[in-house]
């Protein structure tokens, strides 16, 4: 008998406790980075999401799309600037953001999931007032900070066996307002409102690293704050850890910063003993395997 078949069967058997652990759990996945532009990586991600739903997990996919937005702005000769890493979003830019995120990017992910045999529905934070925002910073224009969440539409989709795919575009407090929302921020707000078991932030790095450059597999919020104060957590990792801390404050059981370039990264985190990336969790909760 082919040894690879035996290894596959053993892997499935060893995954049983983790499959049972996450049955009925809500897992919010922030999807972005290089995988969004690669057809093979997109198909693999979609297959993992469909598998999660097949074994009883309720996944929510929240996506970004910065490179696609930049490409469309260039094609339309619309200038776009950044302040401290965030896109200044005027009326012209926010119109393009909504068009690209809710149209091209969102539907591509939905189609990828359906191609793998799953059921998926694309929506944005504007649908059913899922994510109502206030202005984040006057300098940034129509960049929103989630203020009110209405996740009933997501719970209705769970009940129907459908995977929600959410574009990070929010409604305003006033009628007919549209806000561009950072993808990690949107994922954190949705995870918090759902009291998700896990928020998985897929990135292009291995995870949170210590002063020696080694990936830290588990951290408490206090350790994250100390490492940030000491300058160990810096640069682009700070917004991700800030999202993680806020999500945990809102009731999310754990946030994992994962290298989305690793094949089957989400499955490795959820269904294996070792996990993947850096898990940030409250100090009073048990580790990954509980």
Image (tube, grey):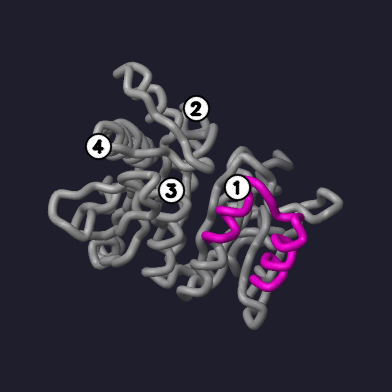
> Which class describes the residues within 10 Å of circle 2: few (<14), some (14-19), or many (20+)?
few
Which SS class for mark 1? helix
Report how far apart the C-alphas of labels 2 and 1 lie in the structure. 16 Å
Q: Quadrant of residue 99?
A: top left
**Which residue has dot 1 on it?**
265
Q: Are marks 3 and 4 in contact (CB under 8 Å)?
A: no
What's the CA distance linking mark 2 and mark 3? 19 Å
The magenta stretch is 221-243
Frontmost residue, 254 versus 290: 254
Q: Residue furthest left?
A: 175
Residue 195 vs residue 149: left or right? right
CA gap, disc 3 and disc 4? 19 Å
Decide whether residue 237 is among the magenta residues.
yes
Image position of 162 (left or right of 199): left
* Residue at which label 3 appears: 183
Mark 2 touches mark 1? (CB < 8 Å): no
On the image, the x and y values in percent for residue 45 come to 49, 41
């Amino acid at each position: 008998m082919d040894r690879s078949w035996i290894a596959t069967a053993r892997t499935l058997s060893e995954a049983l406790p983790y499959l049972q652990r996450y049955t009925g759990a809500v897992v919010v996945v922030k999807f972005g980075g290089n995988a969004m532009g690669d057809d093979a990586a997109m198909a693999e991600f979609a297959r993992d999401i469909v598998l999660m739903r097949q074994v009883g997990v309720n996944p929510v996919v929240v996506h970004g799309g910065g490179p696609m937005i930049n490409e469309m702005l260039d094609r339309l000769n619309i200038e776009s600037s950044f302040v401290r890493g965030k896109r200044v979003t005027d009326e012209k830019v926010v119109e393009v953001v909504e068009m690209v995120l809710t149209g091209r990017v969102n539907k591509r992910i939905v189609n990828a999931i359906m191609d793998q045999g799953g059921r998926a529905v694309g929506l944005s934070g504007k649908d059913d007032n899922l994510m109502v925002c206030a202005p984040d910073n006057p300098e940034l224009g129509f960049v929103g900070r989630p203020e009110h969440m209405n996740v009933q539409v997501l719970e209705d989709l769970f009940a129907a066996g459908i995977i929600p795919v959410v574009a990070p575009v929010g409604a305003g407090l006033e009628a007919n307002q549209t806000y561009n929302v950072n993808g990690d921020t949107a994922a954190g707000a949705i995870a918090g409102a759902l009291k998700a078991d896990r928020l998985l932030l897929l990135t292009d790095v291995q995870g949170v690293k210590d002063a020696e450059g080694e990936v830290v597999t588990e951290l408490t919020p206090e350790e994250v704050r100390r490492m940030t104060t000491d300058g160990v957590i810096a640069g682009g990792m700070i917004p991700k850890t800030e999202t993680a801390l806020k999500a945990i404050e809102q009731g999310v059981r754990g946030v994992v910063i994962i290298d989305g370039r690793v094949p089957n990264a989400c499955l490795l985190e959820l269904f294996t003993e070792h996990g993947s990336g850096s898990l940030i969790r409250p100090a009073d909760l048990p580790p990954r395997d509980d």
